[in-house]
Image (cartoon, rainbow, N blue to C red):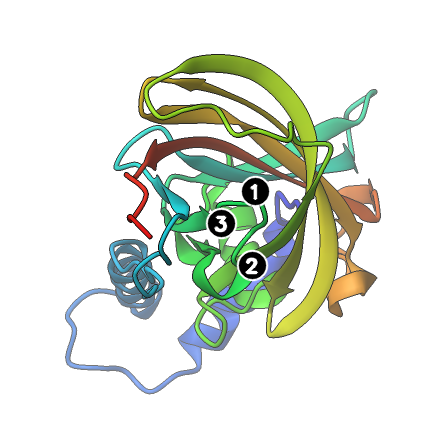
Amino acid sequence: MTMRYTSAAAVLAAATLAGCTPTADARPAHEATQATQATQVTTAQTTTHAPVLAAAPAGAVRFTVAATGNTARYRVREQLMGRDLPNDAIGETTQVTGAITVDDRGAIVADQSRFVVTTAGLKSDSDRRDGYVRRRLLETEQFPTVELVPTAVRGFPARMPAAGATAGPVTFELVGNLTVRGVTKPTTWRVTAKQAGGTVTGTATTRFTFTDFGITPPKVPVVLSVADTIGLEYDFTLTREAAAKP
C-alpha cells in the first residue's frame, strides 16, 4: 500500500485536465480540481460510521471505544527506487468506533460487537500514497469503512476481571470476520490488553494478503517491490460499561 508516484503520472493527469472543458472557476483547471478533491477528502474524513448496537443483554459487559486513545493503521513492506533498504509504508487514522460485548460466561455476543474504521481518514507520510490508497486500493467512495465483527476469543482467562479492578497485561487471540471492500473473511488477531479501573487498553494485530480481499497490489514505477502481506494494527482504549442486571 505504498506509493510515491512518478512525475510521469502527474504529467498524464495534468494533460488530461488540460483537455477538459473550462469551468467558471477562475483558477487553472488542475488547481480547481485539486481544491475539489481536497474538499471531498476533508468532508469524508469528518464523517464517521458508528455502528448501532442494541442494549447489552442482562449479565453482559460491553467495552466501548473511548473518545480518545484509538488508532488503526496498516503496515506494508516496500522497496523504493533509489533506496538501499526496504521500509514500511504506514497509514493510520483515529476514526474508529464500536464496541465488543461479552456475556456472563465470557463468550462474545457477536451480533452486539463491531468495530468500524472510516478509511478516508487514513494518512501516511505521502499525500500521493494516500490518494492512491483511497481511490485505487480501498475505493473509499464505494466502501467507506473497514469493519470487524468479533466472534470468539482463545486463551482468555476463565474469569473476567471485576469492574474497577487493575489486571493484566494478558495476551490472547481474538477471532472475527473482517470486511474490506465488501469482501468478508475470517481473521485471527493477537491481542495484548490490560485493565485499570473502568478502562481497557492494548494492541491488536493481524496479517493477510492483498489477494485475500481481492485487492490488486500497487504497481508504480518508483516502487520496485511491495510485500504481499498487509499488517493491520489497532491501538485501543475501551470504556467498560456496567453490566445489566439479570
Marks 1,3: beta carbons within 8 A: yes
Q: Quadrant of residue 116?
A: bottom left
Q: What kind of element bears circle 2?
A: strand
Marks 2,1: beta carbons within 8 A: no
Q: Quickly name the residue at label 1.
A: 106
Residue at 52% across, 57% down: 109
Q: Quickly name the residue at label 2.
A: 149
Q: Quickly name the residue at label 3.
A: 103
242 to 20, vertically: above or below:
above
70 to 199, vertically: above or below:
below
Q: CA distance from mark 1 to mark 3?
A: 5 Å
Q: What kind of element bears circle 1?
A: loop
Disc on the earlier residue, 2 or 1 = 1
All told, the count of numbered labels is 3
Q: Amino acid at mark 1?
A: Gly
Disc on the earlier residue, 2 or 3 = 3
Between circles 2 and 3, the one closer to the viewer is 3
